[in-house]
Image (cartoon, rainbow, N blue to C red):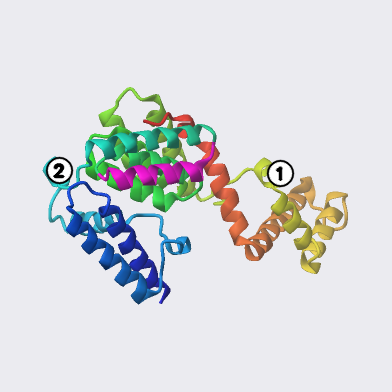
Amino acid sequence: MSVEKRLAFSIVQFLRDQTHSDTLNSDEQESLEVAIQCLETTFKISSDDSHLAVPQSLAEIFLNSIFKVCTAGHLFQWTPSLFQEISASPEDADRAEQLKNEGNNHMKEENYSSAIECYTKAIDLDLNNAVYYCNRAAAHSKLGNFVEATNDCERAIGIDPTYSKAYGRMGLALTAMNKYTDAITYFKKALVLDPDNDTYKSNLKIAEQKLKEASSPTATGLGFDMASLINNPAFISMAASVMQNPQVQQLMSGMMSNAVGGPAAGVGGLSDISSLIEAGQQFAQQIQQQNPELIEQLRNHVRSRSFSGSAEERS
């Protein structure tokens, strides 16, 4: 029933927003109020049930659905005339711009969750502004929400296919998701629209290098450096737990024995290196099995620090 309640709550929010419209007369507004009361009574919800709210408004969810279905089926292209039907009033457009600026300030303060809230409110007021989606994509990327970031970039590009920044930010999100080939395509599209942008050039080289490394037979696939690893408190705690494993202790003991020239030591120390690699691999496997979520967090952390576009200004 929770899904139905969430849907009903979104419908009520939509209807309540419509009651503030200047285009409705008193009778129409009263009809909406009655509809709201009926829905709240039927589904046992109220405006205080904030836990039922979803990140996107009903109108935004509807447009996102149309965008994905229709573009996948090549039914039509997004055009200015299409968006004219959902254009914001001058008052809503002004308020949306204020919210966007507030979101930009939150981004400067690295308060990314608040930035997302501001950009979302701006989108609710003006669904036809590519900048708001693109800025929200940047905030989502900062929080590691790369799927949400790509969705926002898709909407921004659908609204304005000449918006180079949306292609650039799509490239960043795809790179973070290890989708290097797609990322390269978007960075190249961004450069077609903005050939002199050094950020796009730099990020394109990063994506190309990562694709090359991923294709290399010697690539480890771990994707993070030792400094980021050992400075993570959760990793330190987990490593201490892993070291209590008798198998790991046996591996480390054997490795240390070889290192000091024990009977297993080989000519030129090659056996020592082999033991070290074997111990390291099994240690990493133990960590991956015990806490894969932390490994993914570390990967995302390092990815987010690897892109030169991190200091890119908001629109």
* Left or right relative to 222: residue 31: left
Give the residue type that dot 1 points to.
Asn
Instruction: For mark 2, give the secondary structure.
Output: helix
Q: Which residue is rendered at x = 27% and y = 45% of the image?
A: 127
Give x and y (percent) for residue 61.
30, 57
The mark found on residue 231 in the picture is 1
Instruction: For mark 1, give the secondary structure.
Output: loop
User: Residue beneath label 2, please?
Assistant: 84
Give x and y (percent) for residue 66.
22, 57
Give the residue type that dot 2 points to.
Gln
Asked if the residue under mark 1 is in contact with the one under mark 2, i.e. CB atoms within 8 Å, the reply is: no
Q: Which quadrant is home to the C terminus?
A: top left
Q: Which residue is rendered at x = 37% and y = 45% of the image?
A: 121
Residue 208 figure quarter = top left
Residue at far top of view: 196
Residue at far front of view: 26
Give x and y (percent) for residue 84.
15, 43
Q: Which quadrant is home to the N terminus?
A: bottom left
Query: Does the magenta segment cover residue 123?
Result: yes
* Left or right relative to 23: residue 3: right
Q: Which residue is rendered at x = 40% and y = 59% of the image?
A: 54
Highlighted range, magenta:
110-127
Q: Which residue is rendered at x = 26% and y = 67% of the image?
A: 35
